[in-house]
Image: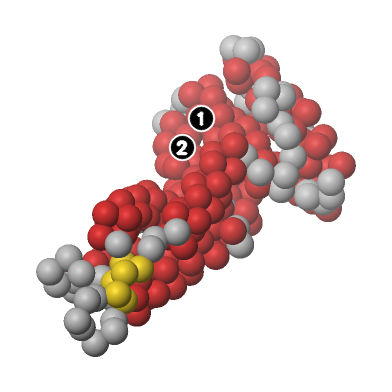
Amino acid sequence: MPKVQDQIVKRFAGLEAQCRAISLTRQVDGDGTSYAHQEQFYAWVTSALNAIQGVFGNESPHYLRFEKELSSISNNYVRDRKLDTFRGIFLGAKSDVDGGHLFALQAAFSGEIFGDFVATAKVALAEGQHTVAAVLACAALEDALKRFAQSNNLSVDGQTMEEVVNALKSKGLVSGAQKTLLAAMPKIRNQAMHAEWSKLTPQDVGSVIGYVEQFLLSHFS
């Protein structure tokens, strides 16, 4: 699992522990209702909201529900039942993080970025600039392969594309026609990145673009 993802999982675990440590006080001469310790609650809820926003975004159900509950608090008093609601929403977000759904979101986001590279490469190829297209397409493919390998718990930091490809093959993550086509990619990548322009053909570049497009559809959409 990539280090950033480890840090996010650890952060949410810490916030869960912080939430469970919030103490309750019973209102004197009241109806027996318990209230969350204000300083502890607001310290936690601010950090929790920030974490949910950073990971899932402003439009996620977790964030919207959390913010709605926060805006409904009156006089800064948070009853025990309201605290349970906040805890439930947060634990739902944490469950998605622990279950790997966060990583699927990251994959989709990465796919959009790689897609932009591929789109630019296709334009360059159509305009007769196949060397420029080769660099863009190969860069997108190499990064996509490494991210895909990392998402499957393979350690590929600092490895060449050929080493990454071999790691994916050894784990059975690529097979069939995809495996055969992928075997040719490191050679084209090296020619593009080492400025061996005379060895590159528009057909080579077209094959990389076609492969990376299919790869993104399969693993980053």
Q: Most extreme residue toward the bottom, as rendered?
A: 31
Task: Determine which residue is flagged by label 1.
Answer: 136
172 w.r.t. 144: above or below: below
Residue in view at x 24 percent, y 76 percent: 27
Q: Which mark is residue 1?
A: none
Residue in view at x 71 percent, y 48 percent: 152
Q: Is residue 142 left or right of residue 172?
A: left
Quadrant showing the N terminus: top right
Between residue 121 and residue 163, name the one nearer to us. 163
Residue in view at x 45 percent, y 59 percent: 21
Q: Position of residue 20 (x, y in %)?
A: 46, 62
Q: Is residue 3 left or right of residue 183?
A: left
User: Which of marks 2 and 1 precedes in the sequence?
Assistant: 2
Q: Most extreme residue toward the front, as rendered?
A: 29
Q: Is residue 123 visible?
A: yes
Give how far apart the Cα atoms at labels 1 and 2 are.
6 Å
Residue kind at label 2, given as amino acid type: Phe
Q: Most extreme residue toward the right, as rendered?
A: 170
Between residue 216 and residue 16, name the one nearer to us. 16
Task: Determine which residue is flagged by label 2.
Answer: 117
61 w.r.t. 29: above or below: above
Secondary-structure class at tag 1: helix
Residue kind at label 1, given as amino acid type: Leu
Whether tag 1 and tag 2 are in contact, CB under 8 A, the answer is yes
Secondary-structure class at tag 2: helix
Q: Is residue 186 visible?
A: no
Q: Position of residue 184 (x, y in %)?
A: 76, 33
